[in-house]
Image: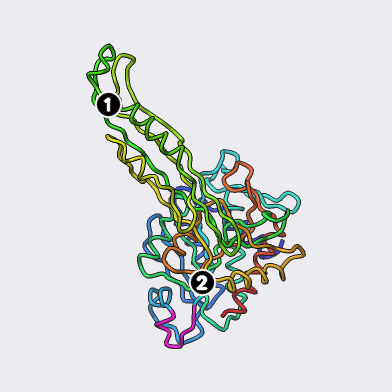
Amino acid sequence: MDELESLTRDLVAISAHDDETAVGDRIESWLREHTDAAVERDDAPNGGNVIARRATGPRSPSGDAIAQRGPDETGDGDTSLALIGHHDVVPPADDQLADDGTYRVHREGGRLYGRGTADMTGALAAMLLAFREAEPAGDVVFASFVGEERGGIGARHAIQNGFSPDYAVVGEGSTGYSAPETVDVAVAHKGRRASTLRASGTAAHASEPEAGTNAVYRACDAVGVVRDLDAPETEVLGHRLAGSLVVTGIDGGGAWNVVPDACEVTVDERTVPGERAALARAAEIEGVAWDVEQDLPPMACDDAAFADAVTDAAAGAQAGAPTQVVKPHATDAGWLADTGTTCVVCGPAEPGEAHTDAESVSLDALRTCRDAYTAIAARWP
């Protein structure tokens, strides 16, 4: 068993769906034991983010200052590169959970099976080894966040406290988009805006409907507006990225003989960089209010040369020919890109593996990612 498989197994086995403290402890201790990086553990909810930096110049004694230092503060104009992942996972299926509360992990053929192998503990192991092995000319950061599966809690906390790398490779899945087993590079991904349209009316006895105002009718009018709206779309580095817009639920009324005075409609919108559907038009209907419940930002790489450099590194690490692709899923790259970090996504998970009861990752894809991350960091800047 090589070091990459061993470290992946070690990290995957640690329970991380209710509380990420233990796996964060393991990542932090590994960094302190195996690298000379300045390591910070912040106070983000549920165990804290782990952020480490290998700087080429003199290091500050303050972990915060090191982790948050931007190019204007280095004095020499250098830019920073971050390797970024998250160490929380979604709850395991029953057969993924051992009796002692750890996660089961096992190998079958060339794949590791277990909760988090694909999303994204395996990528974290690859990034840790790359962070240790590379000898960069510029500042390189490793960051693993809590709460990605709960709306980017850790990433948002870090950003609010000054975390702002210039460039980032986020280790979410990009394998198998162009061809099976090929590790590609995603230059954009969709975001997600979850909305509720709330229609209000006036209750009345159903035998005299004219005495009330039917909230369900108003909600249906709002649904009609949504159906007529165009879904957002854009182009990123020559790749078309199309969003979507769909009503996913409607709830109103409480009795057969009562005109309903309230009705709610839920709407799922997959957003694209710079574009949103004009949902405000639905709120122009009398008695209808529009509330955004969640807005996970999309990501678009704004530097073609960086995207090409990462793609070249991925090409040098595998037999297949990687291409630049777009992802349908939101990641922490959206929060970073939203605040000015140039991002791409490159990781071993394949479509359909994350969050499944039989979640697994290809060991070959893990090795490709480790070598690609090492090459990216070693060439930086």
Which quadrant would residue 297 be assigned to in this image?
A: bottom left
In the figure, 264 relative to 10: above or below? above
In terms of depth relative to the viewer, which is nearer, 46 or 376? 376
Residue found at the very far top of the displayed protein: 207
- x and y percent of residue 132 in the render? 59, 74
Residue, disc 1: 261
- x and y percent of residue 83 in the render? 54, 68
Range of magenta residues: 71-79
Pointer 2 local density, CA inside 10 Å: few below 14, some 14–19, many at least 20: many
Q: Tell me the SS state at disc 1.
A: loop
Which quarter of the rendering shows the C terminus? Answer: bottom right
Magenta highlight on residue 18: no
- x and y percent of residue 86 in the render? 50, 58
- x and y percent of residue 220 in the render? 38, 30
User: Is tag 2's residue or tag 1's residue first in the polypeptide sequence?
Assistant: 2
In terms of depth relative to the viewer, which is nearer, 252 or 371? 252
Residue found at the very far front of the displayed protein: 228
Residue at 58%, 81% in the rendered image = 136
Q: Is residue 222 visible?
A: yes
Marks counted in the figure total 2
Q: Is residue 147 visible?
A: no
In the figure, 166 relative to 244: above or below? below
Give the Cα distance between marks 2 and 1: 51 Å
Q: Amino acid at mark 2?
A: Tyr
Coloring scheme of the render? Answer: rainbow
Residue at 35%, 38% in the rendered image = 197
203 horizontally vs 15: left or right: left
Q: Amino acid at mark 1?
A: Asp
Identify the mark at residue 167; answer none if there is no mark. Answer: 2
Pointer 1 local density, CA inside 10 Å: few below 14, some 14–19, many at least 20: some
